[in-house]
């Protein structure tokens, strides 16, 4: 049951996960890194602000529609039983109204960009809406989430260059594989409950091979990021960032070998620093080093 004295404002904030910014940061860092690449340095302030606030709005909208889709399932999962919608603390109408407001905010923001980006954003919205239902039909819903979370990458190129070059799709693919890896770790937290209620995930699909599957995805991510660096003619500083990311991945592997729920969640959260390191490496190559040269 929900906390009796919890205000509506706090309930809405929890529904949108404003009290848990991890997902927003995981979405934000690669998007801003892509914007830096697309801009070949410091991006225009107005475009930067559109993507920052647009990312926040769309992540919140994704959380709302996810909870709406899972409102009858979350009550059977220990971690999600107290979420506002499934606990009955708010109505379905309220959740859908909040979702509509968030989508409207995102639409207003993207309308400030060029028409190509506006049209391109429709694909991202459709993927975000479809994702919550995929866990009923496929053991790879993490791949759909990866596409949804990575959609901001090609959008940044559309906004800045009015085109989506191959390098954008290369970064998109690297991001997608990385997201499958870390969301598999997240899904491990609920795996036993998900099996009982029939929810599918890569955590169930990979079974006992989860650490190895995640390692393979992490290695593939590093390989694609190295290929990205080669295409962008990046130097030592970015490859040093990749070494740091590899160290984070090894740390995550060490954590999940304990095969305990808290370890999987800690490994998942560690990916905030992976995204931040990627952004730092891009900013170093695109802005700081040229400025110092």
Image (cartoon, rainbow, N blue to C red):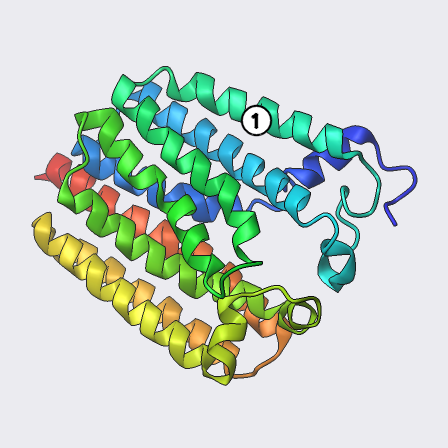
Query: Residue sitting at 77 percent across and 47 percent down?
Result: 86
Corner quadrant of residue 108 = top left
Give the residue pinned by disc 1: 102
Question: Residue 149: where, in percent of width, then height?
Answer: 42, 46
User: Would you say residue 29 is visible in this rendering?
Assistant: yes
Query: Residue sitting at 76 percent across and 42 percent down?
Result: 85
**Most foreground residue, 159 or 133:** 133
Which element carries disc 1, helix, strand or loop? helix
280 left or right, relative to 99: left
Query: Residue sitting at 34 percent across and 60 percent down?
Result: 177
Question: Residue 257: where, in percent of width, then height?
Answer: 50, 83
Other-residue count near label 1 (Cα within 10 Å), few / some / many at <14 / 14–19 / ≥20: many
Q: In this view, does 191 lie above or below 114?
A: below
25 left or right, relative to 30: right
Q: In this view, does 22 lie above or below 197?
A: above
**Most foreground residue, 245 or 219:** 219
**Most foreground residue, 159 or 198:** 198
User: Would you say residue 22 is visible in this rendering?
Assistant: no
Q: Is residue 68 above or below residue 108?
A: below
Question: Residue 41: where, in percent of width, then height?
Answer: 19, 33
Q: Quadrant of the C terminus?
A: top left
Corner quadrant of residue 259 = bottom right
């Amino acid at each position: 049951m929900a906390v009796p004295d919890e205000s509506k404002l706090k309930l809405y904030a929890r529904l949108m996960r404003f009290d848990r910014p991890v997902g927003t940061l995981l979405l934000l860092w690669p998007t801003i890194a892509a914007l830096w690449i697309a801009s070949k340095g410091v991006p225009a302030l107005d475009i930067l602000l559109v993507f920052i606030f647009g990312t926040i709005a769309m992540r919140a909208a994704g959380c709302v529609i996810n909870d709406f889709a899972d409102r009858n399932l979350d009550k059977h999962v220990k971690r999600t039983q107290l979420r506002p919608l499934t606990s009955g603390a708010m109505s379905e109408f309220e959740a859908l109204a909040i979702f509509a407001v968030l989508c409207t905010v995102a639409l207003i923001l993207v309308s400030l960009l060029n028409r190509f980006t506006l049209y391109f954003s429709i694909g991202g919205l459709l993927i975000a809406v479809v994702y919550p239902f995929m866990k009923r039909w496929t053991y790879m819903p993490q791949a759909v989430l990866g596409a949804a979370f990575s959609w901001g990458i090609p959008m940044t190129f559309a906004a800045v260059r009015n085109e989506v070059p191959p390098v954008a799709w290369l970064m998109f693919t690297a991001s997608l594989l990385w997201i499958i890896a870390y969301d598999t770790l997240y899904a491990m937290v609920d795996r036993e409950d998900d099996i009982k209620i029939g929810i599918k995930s890569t955590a169930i699909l990979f079974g006992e091979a989860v650490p190895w599957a995640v390692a393979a995805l992490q290695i593939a991510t590093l390989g694609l990021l190295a290929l990205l660096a080669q295409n962008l003619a990046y130097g030592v500083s970015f490859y040093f960032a990749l070494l740091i990311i590899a160290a984070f991945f090894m740390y995550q592997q060490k954590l999940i070998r304990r095969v305990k729920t808290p370890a999987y969640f800690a490994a998942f959260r560690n990916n905030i620093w992976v995204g931040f390191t990627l952004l730092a490496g891009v900013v170093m190559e695109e802005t700081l080093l040229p400025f110092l040269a």
